[in-house]
Amino acid sequence: MIQGNRHLPNKNIFPVKNISLSLIVIQLLSAFSPVFAGGADHTENQKFIVTAYYSPLPNQSFYLKGSYEADIRLNGNGTHGASGKAVYPGMLAGPKTYAFGTKIYLEGLGVGTVDDRGGAIVSSGSRGYDADRLDIWMGQGEEGLRRALSWGKRSVIGKIISKKEETDTKTIDLSQVKITKINTATYKKQQEQKVTEIEEVLNIFNSAISKNTEVEKIQELQTILSRLSYYSGAIDGKNSKILENAIYDFQIENQLVVSRKNLGAGYYGVKTRAKLQQIYALYTENEKIRVAEEARITLEKAQEEKRLALIQAEQEKQLKAQKKEVTLFVQGLGSPKANEIGAHVRSLQQSLKSLGYFAQKDTAIFGKNTRAALISYQTDRNITPEEFGKLGKATKEALFKDLLVMKEKQNKELAWSGK
């Protein structure tokens, strides 16, 4: 996957990063105790920090960011990994140090294969992580989202699988990931809203937060961090560990701290507030542009659909009129007998001539030449011999189809000529 942040709560979408795979990655923000770090050249057991992602589909009952469009806009289209392979159960996104095709055993899951990348999927020691990061694809649509949310972020023991061990391993079975009950209301409330002006924020950029901070201010901070894809918890106004982790992830992404050990890590201090205000201002401006552009596109699309609907209605009206005209014409041909004379015979001769079967002068007489032309036409149209030389039902149906096509072609030519 082209580099971009993958784990959803920590992903800074401004400035926008290029991401080729529609993968919304969800993590449960929590602290982990230090364990030895591993690398792609190790084959012994090691710890991995494993998050989960999924590919959104239209018409889900809920989305991480409130709508299909928002989820797609956040990450892309969700069809292929960075290696070019289509998404599949067991696909892993790994750090750049892991070659595509690297197989990794994860306890309780099985073996996955690295076929994807992500800007936030880094090696141990980067961005404050004490172990290599991995993302595991959890499926498509709502089931994939529920499974990814249920998984969250976990510390998992595993190891790199050597070539000689690959034949004895089983791939990851997503059914092993238990889907827990998800409070979808939390995510449904995040349906895309109109852009909030910076001036409307309750001074959240002017002061730190604590246990005594007003609920409304914390809710505002949660909302801002949620819009920037760092916070995925409920907008409940609680100064929780989840909020602290979101602040820390924001600090890491914006190089305000390098690890949990840094002074101010997870604290909503002066530098953090200033940086957040700067990035949120850019987000707001970009949202204004996006909303205006979407409104323009929606209007143009509606106008085009209306125009096409009018054209289709007119075409259907013309076709109906043409069918009626040709039907009456074919009915008017009657069932002429040998040497019968009349205008209806002349019409038959003209029809056969226009279809390439009658080359003589129109005589209005149903003579041998007319009968021979009719039989030739009937033969080409696989009419049964019983009707040869007669205007039976099957022959009239064939004439109707051919004359209707000819009529439509003539009308198109007239339309092109402007007549």
Image: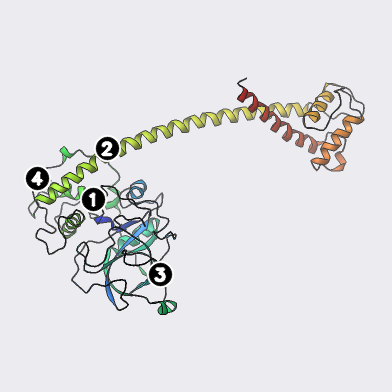
**Residue in front for this viewpoint, 371 or 87:** 87
Question: SS at mark 2?
Answer: helix
Mark 2 vs 4, N-terminal side: 4
Reading the image, the residue beneath label 2 is: 288
Amino acid type, residue under disc 2 in the picture? Lys
Where residue 219 appears, as percent x and y from the top left, is 17, 49
Element class at badge 1: helix
Q: Residues within 10 Å of mark 4 (few under 14, many from 20)?
A: few
- Amino acid type assigned to the residue bearing label 4 in the image: Asn
| Residues at marks 4 and 1, CA–CA distance in whole angstroms | 19 Å
Distance between mark 1 and mark 3 Cα atoms:
31 Å
Mark 1 highlights which residue? Answer: 226
Q: Amino acid at mark 1?
A: Ser
Q: Are marks 2 and 4 in contact (CB under 8 Å)?
A: no
Of the image marks 1 and 2, the number of the one nearer the N terminus? 1
* CA distance for labels 2 and 4: 24 Å
Query: Marks 1 and 4: in contact by CB < 8 Å?
Result: no
| Real-space CA distance between mark 1 and mark 2, rounded to the nearest whole angstrom | 18 Å
Query: Mark 1 against mark 2, which lies toward the viewer?
Result: 2
Where is mark 4, residue-wise?
206
Confirm or deny contact between disc 2 and disc 3 (CB under 8 A): no
Q: Is residue 364 left or right of residue 323?
A: right
Q: Residue at x 26, y 73 (%)?
A: 38
- Separation (CA) of disc 3 from disc 4: 49 Å
The residue that mark 3 highlights is 173
Which secondary structure lies at badge 4? Answer: loop
Mark 2: few/some/many CA within 10 Å (<14, 14-19, 20+): some
Quadrant in the rendering for residue 366: top right
Above or below residue 68? Residue 182 is below
